[in-house]
Amino acid sequence: MSVSEKVNQASKNAVSGLVAELGKVSKKVSFARNWKELAAAVKKESPTLLVLLPHSGVDEKIPGKPPKLELGGEWLARGALEAAHIIGPKSDRPVVLLLGCDTNTAEIPFLNFIKRFKDCGAAMVMGTITQIDALRTVDFVKRLAAEIQSSGSKKTFGELLLSSRQNMLAKGDGYALSLLAYGDSDQ
């Protein structure tokens, strides 16, 4: 797991609570402070789920304004994202929750990060299509973790996502509409 410096500033307690909630689902939860630490954690742990809460931006100096993502104050251009940030030596293709503002938008559609994460080995990537609130994002991931914990291994990840989103919508929470998933969610 890794988060934007802005997410940390918005609510350190919420992020700590999220790490604790994820710990109920997995025996090992690693927190990476930036992209370099994320690559090292992926190499060491070979995770099946990556939870990333980045801040998104664009490089104003380059024509087309290619997107970039920030984790822990460190910016990474789309082209610098590598398989080492996503897939470890002992894992199958992981699921990536890329839950920062506008992680699935780019001025030039083929430059979005969702496609890059998939190209680098992610089985499924969930991204966002609008500005999102850090606290609501943390709440969504906590709900998803609770769904995972309550189902054991009886449901696919896609079924768990669907159930979480349906529950949110049934309660009048439109946050679920800002999330899109791409790839193989039947694992």
Image (cartoon, rainbow, N blue to C red):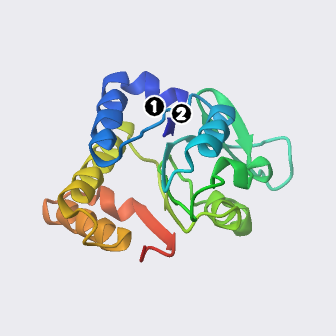
Considering every residue shown, the one lying at the far left of the view is: 171
Return the x and y of residue 6 as percentages of the image width and height: 50, 28
Label 2, on which residue? 4
Distance (Cα) linking label 2 and label 1? 5 Å
Tag 2–tag 1 contact (CB < 8 Å): yes
| Residue placed most toward the observer, 23 or 172 | 23
Percent coordinates x, y for residue 62 in the rendering: 86, 47
Q: Which amino acid type is shown beneath numbered disc 2? A: Ser
Tell me: residue 131, above or below residue 113: above
Q: Position of residue 164 (x, y in %)?
A: 25, 62
SS at badge 1:
helix
Residue at image location 50% in from the left, 76% down from the top: 184
The foreground one among 187 and 6 is 187
Pinpoint residue 172: horizontal percent, then vertical percent: 16, 60
Residue in the foreground of this view, choosing between 65 and 35: 35
Q: Which residue is the site of mark 1?
A: 7
Q: Quadrant of residue 20?
A: top left
Characterize the local packing of mark 1: few (<14), some (14-19) or many (20 or more) Cα atoms within 10 angstroms.
Answer: many
Residue at point 32% right, 61% down? 176
